[in-house]
Image: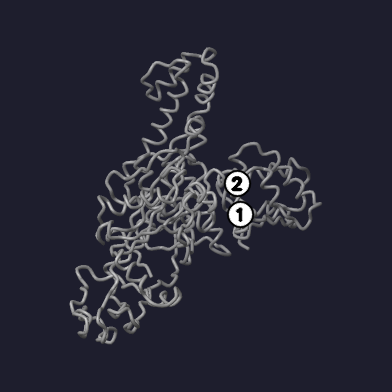
């Protein structure tokens, strides 16, 4: 049995980047450098320790030639976890001398639970043949848990450590990158206790000097405290979602998105609570409004956005935004797809990609993007006056030539998309790494970005031959403006993304043909159930298109709940 050692006791989780060609022994060497700097740790010297490396399933790594890249490919993950197990060599040699088969020794190899800070257990100094006893324990520890025995030697295990090390596939074939402050990149956030603050040892191993029958103290199990799921209600006002949602998650740090029951409701401008069939549609609508306001108020860029610093947003505000990113992904697979992918990767995993140049051309104005693209392709045909004016607006400090135009643009991209928002990235990473979100950002962005083809594939109608349903499909095919397509999707589903279920399939949108006439004739959406009611009678497609455009361009949408 191994005990998980937390960061304050010298263990904890460490996030590092390693060359994918490293094998088992090379990985172990890096582990030992992390947890045994200068050959020492709080639990002893490296020379006195035996150690082994296990995978994320706690299975020891047997193959010496398997590389880190092989393990990552096999696990199908962007980053993988390993555990470093250590034991004192004296214990290992003692265990090898125990009688019985491996199955029998498994029952007697019991490690002591972690001790309270400052509390020490000492080996018995009794000579062979004398009765020995367990040294004094904490006065609060039940006396029935430790017995005097007639054994000749009382042996206990020292702290057996199970230290967590997290490896991330590096986009570069570089060496290990560590935090210069020597602090773990992913400390146990919000955990003020380490393993040494757990209750006193409830299990001890007692052996006789002649390695005869082992005597075990009675076992008092330590029952872990598991918090019951609780109901957490989020209430925000329409038009104030950005500020109110940030405030809520600044003040409530203990919400477990995976276990707790998250309820959402929106207060309308008239003071009434918005009606809804369930909380799912409201949550999607809330997150959609949050990100729409966030793009508008807290970012710079055109097609792709980068968050920018504001004097009224401090570190806790950005950490709260990190929680909102985690909330959207865990509950509904929602991601802020208008943020630059490299920025989101850095916020999630601590490192980005090598596509900064491509993303930069989508970050700047389209007119600037066209001129820079032409200059990269053929410098001689570029309008030098316009090119120099654009570069000057981005504080270019070097003379441009056909040989350096590409590298210079990459440098400018790195400055504006990585260096300037580095404080924001660090705040988001500090929070997001604790959720251990597993996703391929590029793949997810591609999947949930709406297109006419994707939207059409989700439509189901009980009357597929009706004229109104045909008008709807034609209307969707004709949409060329991405913003209008996102608006239509949000009107129907409360989210402007193509969301999917646990099987990876897009949610179905049910289209119902209803009898509506006169001033009541209009499309009505039921966002909770992803249902769209459209009138049965339209004089022509032109009339249908006019009414649909009027609904989508309106600042107030009429919805129902179902």
Q: Is residue 383 above or below residue 363?
A: above
Which quadrant of the rendered structure holds the N terminus? bottom left
Residue 140's quadrant in the figure? Answer: bottom left
- For the residues bearing labels 1 and 2, Cβ distance under 8 angstroms: yes
Asked whether, in this view, residue 42 is left or right of residue 439, the answer is: left
Identify whether 423 is placed above or below 82.
Answer: above
Q: Residue at x 72, y 45 (%)?
A: 544
| Residue lying at 29% horizontally and 43% vertically, measured from the top left | 180
Would you name the residue on which mark 1 appears?
500
Which quarter of the image is occupied by the C terminus?
bottom right
| Earlier sequence position, callout 1 versus callout 2 | 2
Q: Nearer the viewer, residue 309 or 159?
A: 159
Question: Which residue is painted at 31% across and 41% down in the image?
Answer: 311
Foreground of the two, 268 or 285: 285
The answer to which image quadrant residue 157 occupies is: bottom left
Residue 288 in view, yes or no: no
Q: Secondary structure at mark 2?
A: helix
What x and y, as percent, mark residue 555?
55, 46
Q: Position of residue 360 (x, y in %)?
A: 48, 31
Would residue 126 be visible to someone looking at this image?
A: yes
Provide residue 244's location: percent of width, then percent of height: 40, 54
Check disc 2 and report the residue beneath it.
447
Residue toward you, 548 or 351: 351
Mark 1 → mark 2, Cα distance in angstroms:
9 Å
Quadrant in the picture for residue 150: bottom left
Residue 384 percent location from the top left of the image: 47, 13
């Amino acid at each position: 049995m191994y005990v998980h050692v937390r960061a304050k006791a010298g263990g904890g989780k460490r996030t590092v980047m390693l060359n994918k060609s490293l094998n088992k022994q090379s990985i172990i060497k890096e582990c030992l450098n992390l947890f045994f700097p200068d050959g020492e740790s709080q639990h002893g010297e490296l020379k006195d320790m035996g150690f082994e490396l296990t995978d994320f399933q706690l299975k020891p790594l047997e193959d010496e030639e398997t590389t880190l890249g092989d393990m990552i490919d096999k696990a199908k993950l962007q980053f993988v976890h390993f555990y470093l197990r250590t034991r004192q060599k004296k214990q290992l040699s003692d265990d090898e001398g125990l009688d019985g088969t491996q199955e029998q020794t498994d029952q007697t190899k019991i490690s002591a639970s972690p001790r309270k800070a400052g509390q020490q257990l000492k080996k018995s100094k009794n000579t062979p043949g004398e009765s020995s006893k367990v040294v004094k324990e904490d006065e609060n520890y039940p006396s029935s848990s430790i017995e005097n025995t007639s054994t000749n030697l009382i042996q206990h295990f020292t702290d057996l450590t199970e230290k967590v090390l997290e490896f991330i596939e590096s986009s570069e074939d570089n060496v290990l990158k560590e935090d210069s402050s020597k602090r773990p990149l992913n400390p146990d956030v919000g955990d003020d206790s380490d393993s040494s603050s757990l209750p006193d040892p409830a299990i001890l191993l007692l052996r006789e000097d002649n390695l005869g029958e082992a005597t075990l103290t009675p076992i008092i199990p330590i029952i872990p405290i598991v918090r019951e799921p609780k109901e957490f209600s989020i209430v925000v006002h329409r038009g104030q979602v950005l500020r109110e949602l940030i405030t809520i998650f600044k003040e409530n740090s203990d919400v477990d998105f995976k276990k707790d029951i998250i309820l959402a409701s929106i207060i309308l401008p008239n003071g009434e609570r918005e009606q809804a069939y369930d909380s799912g549609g409201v949550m999607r609508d809330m997150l959609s409004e949050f990100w729409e306001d966030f793009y508008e108020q807290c970012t710079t860029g055109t097609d792709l956005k980068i968050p920018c610093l504001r004097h009224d947003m401090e570190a806790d505000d950005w950490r709260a935004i990190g929680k909102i990113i985690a909330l959207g992904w865990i509950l509904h697979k929602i991601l802020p797809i208008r943020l630059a992918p490299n920025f989101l990767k850095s916020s999630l995993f601590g490192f980005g990609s090598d596509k900064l140049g491509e993303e930069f051309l989508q970050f700047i104005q389209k007119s600037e993007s066209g001129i820079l693209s032409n200059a990269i392709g053929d410098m001689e045909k570029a309008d030098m006056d316009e090119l120099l004016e654009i570069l000057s607006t981005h504080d270019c400090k070097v003379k441009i030539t056909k040989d350096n135009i590409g590298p210079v643009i990459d440098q400018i991209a790195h400055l504006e998309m990585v260096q300037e928002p580095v404080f924001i990235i660090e705040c988001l990473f500090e929070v997001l790494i604790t959720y251990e979100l597993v996703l391929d950002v590029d793949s997810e962005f591609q999947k949930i970005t709406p297109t006419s083809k994707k939207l059409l594939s989700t439509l189901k109608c009980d009357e597929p031959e009706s004229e109104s349903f045909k008008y709807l499909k034609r209307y969707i095919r004709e949409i060329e403006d991405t913003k209008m397509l996102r608006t239509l999707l949000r009107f129907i589903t409360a989210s402007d993304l193509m969301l999917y279920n646990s099987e990876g399939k897009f949610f179905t949108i049910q289209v119902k043909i209803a009898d509506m006439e006169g001033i009541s004739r209009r499309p009505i959406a039921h966002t909770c159930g992803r249902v769209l009611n459209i009138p049965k009678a339209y004089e022509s497609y032109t009339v249908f298109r006019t009414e649909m455009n009027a609904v989508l361009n309106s600042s107030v949408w009429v919805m129902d709940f179902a």
